[in-house]
Amino acid sequence: MRTALRWIGVVILIGGLGGFVVPSAQAGTTIGIKLASGVAPDHPENIGARKIKELVEKKAGDQLDVQVFTDGQLGDQRTMVENMRNGTLEVTWVTVGFFGSYEPILNVIESGYLFRDSQHSYKVFDGPMGEEIRGLVEKHGVKLLGYWEAGLRHITNSARPIRTPEDLKGLKIRTPQAKYHLNTLKYMGANPVAMSFGELYTAMQQKVVDGQENPVSNIYKSKFYEVQKYMSLTGHLHLTHMVMYSAKLWDKLPADLQKIVRESVIESQETQRKAVRDDDENLTKELKAKGMLVNEADRDAFRKSVLPLREEAVKEFGPKAKEWIDKIEATK
């Protein structure tokens, strides 16, 4: 009883001195963190997720327990993002353009042939523009903790090799639900169809769509070679993932644990990005071994075909879109 009264007295004293001191975490409690994706366990996204788990649990001990959910176990991308914003899922990641449905100007980032290569994208998102995007994204119920590589995208289909824009005419090609991503394929000559990734394999198998476009790792690890004959190396989009934490749940984390999670996401970036680069180098050979016919595309022709999309962006979003495009192109 005396101990209890002494503790109450300490609390009152602290309150009188200007506020309560919040402990880092209640003794003996473990906070659970769920990381969720829609792709296979050995995909670079989940290699990055497991790296976060390793780093967080090493630094936080038994204060944090990280669980990684793969293969869309917790829903498709839209569902996971909404659950995160609503405070029922801690962490997921989507491309910058995917978040254009919440902050429309972010669609501009997914204009075709805007990024030269992986290193170019790292410099853009790890610099001032990454911070500017963070400010826009965090108005929508999330904390943006870091950027991962989503990879360079190529086209597969079941009809013919794609070498020029003419070859895409009449083909239904699935894209994510992101306006400028979809419009990139339209300007390239395709008939783009927005569809969730989880529905894609069956849609190709049943000929609902003729093909799709994704990084090599997605094509291989989702076994698209079973339902697609041709892969054409168009390299039309280089996308970046935003690793995000639910703002509602973030605010419940003690400050010292927030620091651990934020640092772990940043430290995971090189592991995740290297996994993408390794897959790009190795899995094209594996896809050929699985029977896919792989060809180079005329990237200059496709690059010219999508230039009107930049003009469209400036008309829709004004000087800010031009500023972003110019900044990206000027980044060396």
Image: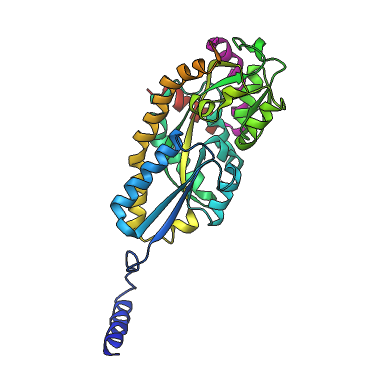
Q: Which residues are magenta?
A: 296-318
Residue 32, percent from left and from top: 43, 57
In this view, the residue farthest toward the bottom is 1
Which residue: 44% across, 50% down? Answer: 67
- 311 vs 33, left or right, is right
Q: Quadrant of the N terminus?
A: bottom left
Q: Nearer the viewer, residue 8 or 13?
A: 8
Q: Looking at the image, can residue 9 be seen?
A: yes
Q: Is residue 54 left or right of residue 40?
A: left
Q: How is the rendered protein coloured? A: rainbow
Magenta stretch, main secondary structure class: helix
Q: Is residue 310 visible?
A: no
Q: Left or right of 57: which side holds 93?
A: right
Q: Residue 19: give x, y in percent of width and height.
A: 34, 73
- Asked where in the image residue 172 lies, by quadrant, the reply is top right
Foreground residue among 11 and 57: 57
Residue 209 rendering spot, x and y as whole percentages: 69, 25
Is residue 271 highlighted in magenta? no
Q: Is residue 295 above or below residue 95?
A: above
Asked if residue 316 lies in the magenta stretch, the reply is yes
